Image (cartoon, grey):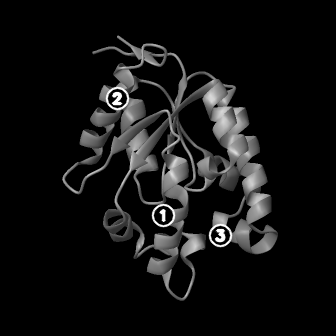
Amino acid sequence: MVWKLHKTVVLVGMMGAGKTAVGKALAAKLDVPFLDSDFEIVTAANMSIAEIFERDGEAFFRARESEVIARLLDGAPCVLSTGGGAFFAERNRTLISERGVSVCLNAALPLLWSRVRNKDTRPLLQTPDPYATLSALFEARAPIYELADVSVDASHDYSIEDMAGQVVQALALRADVLET
């Protein structure tokens, strides 16, 4: 099936929800570019997100993140993966709502933990008790992610392709976003 994407699809959700992996598969299905706001920030800064956090702090990172998201939303429709905290900022939610469509990849806490627990690339989890930190972030952010335009539930049973298919099905219900 050939799809026509009218608006940029912005994937939001917790770290470990699958925004990057599902985003790449979704972009392939829709035959549009895949962009990753974290990658764009890392490329522009020539340092890792962890290094940016350490050197400049989270507030500096979040400001750059908003600038990058705004710039990417000005381009042709694509699939855009954002960092786990991006949607938490009201300015980003407003930008995304005005210029694209937000899709929350909902994953339960045990699934998220299974995906992030052995990775050292998550600066917010560099704490004495990373599970407690992830749990607190999950509890704080869940109500904000519920504000997304579209929500798709993840499952241990879904492959990346399955999840991308679930997102396509959800977007297909929105003629302003996606049509055949």
x, y percentage for residue 107? 36, 55
For the N terminus, the quadrant is top left
Amino acid residing under circle 3: Ala
Q: Residues within 10 Å of mark 3 (few under 14, many from 20)?
A: some
Vertical arrangement, residue 98 with respect to residue 124, above or below = above
Q: Toward the viewer: 68 or 166?
A: 166
Instruction: Give the Cα separation between the discs numbered 3 and 1.
Output: 20 Å
x, y percentage for residue 48? 65, 64
Q: Which residue is mark 3?
A: 50
Instruction: Give the Cα separation between the discs numbered 2 and 1.
Output: 23 Å
Amino acid residing under circle 1: Phe
Q: Which residue is mark 2?
A: 170
Residue under the point 34% across and 60% down: 108
Outermost residue to the bottom = 128
Amino acid residing under circle 2: Ala
For the C terminus, the quadrant is top left
Q: Earlier in the sequence, mark 3 or mark 2?
A: 3
Q: From the viewer's perspective, is the residue at label 2 or at label 1 nearer?
A: 1
x, y percentage for residue 114? 33, 69
Q: Which residue is mark 1?
A: 138
